[in-house]
Amino acid sequence: MSKRTVSKKGEREAGKKEGREGADGEERDVIVDTVARVMIPLSQMFALYVMIGTEGAGGGFQGGVIFAASLILLATVFGVKKGRDVLPEGENAILSSLGLYIYAGVGLLCMVLLWGAAEYLNYGAFPLPVEYALRRGYLVTYAVEVGIGITVATVFASLFFDLAWREDVLGRDEGRRDL
Amino acid sequence: MVIGLKAIHFVGILTVVMLLALFFYVLEDVPAFGDPHSPVNERVLLFRIKATDAIVDDLNRGILPDELRAEFERRGLDIDGAVVRRVEEGEGKEGGYDINVHLNESEYNTREPEIPCYFVNVSEEIRIYRYTPAIRYKERTEEECGVPNMVTAVLADYRGYDTLGETTVIFTAGVAVILLLRRYGRL
């Protein structure tokens, strides 16, 4: 019998003292705990690199999915409740629409800042003090791709959190009845 | 009020109506194929030579002039079986000549036998342009968009409307799942 399924009181207390307590009060495996603690920040850094670093392959979609994968790893290891504490429902909804607002808003700002002289999504007309090609490049890299990444990351994390719930704790009908 | 409308509901309805009006105002400004001054919607200038009467006569008769053929061959461009067709000056486009090139790669080729590849504009001098956008993506991405990655430039700059729609699709899928399955604080 593995250490994880045994829930003796003494071991549970020891796990709590070290901060290695799972979702249902059991002690987590040391290896899983350590690997997750190392991998989550690394994969989040890699997600930002894929999102913004235009030198290599990738872009907003791929970077956002990698970031969502790090949040899903956090939720699988530390429990769904801990994962929801990191990304609460309200912030999740706000962020997933914020990314789209950034993308469409940059396109609208090109029109608004020039009083209608430029077209929608005409990045080259945006009043930045650099030359034409670099203006397009900066807006694509730091506004459009980041907007796509925020939307994709939060939408995929929200898909996981909305689908991950325990039937044996609440019951299927009990959870839905009083919505 | 029978259904219990509060002031905040009217504010919400007003915001939605104003956003809708803004959307229709923006829609007036959206061109059919994206930004018309975007680099991808303009032709690439290949080279320019001096205009002479012989060249213009040849172009009017539908023959590719020898000077132009020599320039094309010097740049290694395939110009075999080229046909010159006159393009009338229309609304929003300048007049000139299309150079159509035959593509006889295989007998199973189901495409049109000739496609317009180059465009000739005659004014004080003769300017020769190239049409195909794929070549532009490959050759000009870095100097036109300032992004070293070709895929990023095509995705977010040349095809910006498409990507905006894709992001909206993902956002809509997320909202649908939230409306159907979210348990609002119950885990």
Image: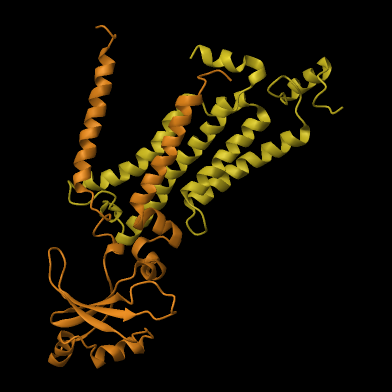
Q: Nearer the viewer, residue B95 or A143?
A: B95
The hue in which chain A appears in the rendered picture of the protein: yellow
Q: Give the left or right position of residue B47, taking residue A172 as reference.
A: left
Residue A32 against residue A134 in the figure, above or below? above
Q: Residue furthest right?
A: A1
Residue B178 against residue A128 in the figure, above or below? above
Identify the image quadrant of the N terminus of chain A: top right
Residue depicted at 41% across the width and 52% down the height: A141
Q: Give the left or right position of residue A119, taking residue B172 as reference.
A: left
Does residue A145 appear anywhere in the picture?
yes
Residue depicted at 63% across the width and 39% down the height: A40
Residue B3 against residue A112 in the figure, above or below? above
Count of marks placed on residues: 0
Query: Image quarter for residue A82?
Result: top right
Residue depicted at 41% across the width and 41% down the height: B169
Residue depicted at 20% across the width and 34% down the height: B21
Q: Position of residue B131 (x, y in %)?
A: 30, 71
Chain shaded orange: B
Q: Give the left or right position of residue A173, taking residue B62 as reference.
A: right
Q: Position of residue B102 (x, y in %)?
A: 34, 81
Residue A110 against residue B50 in the figure, above or below? above
Q: Nearer the viewer, residue B84 or A64?
A: B84
Query: Image quarter for residue B105?
Result: bottom left
Q: Give the left or right position of residue B88, taking residue A102 as reference.
A: left
Does residue B148 appear anywhere in the picture?
no
Query: Image quarter for residue A105?
Result: top left
Q: Position of residue A25 (x, y in %)?
A: 72, 19
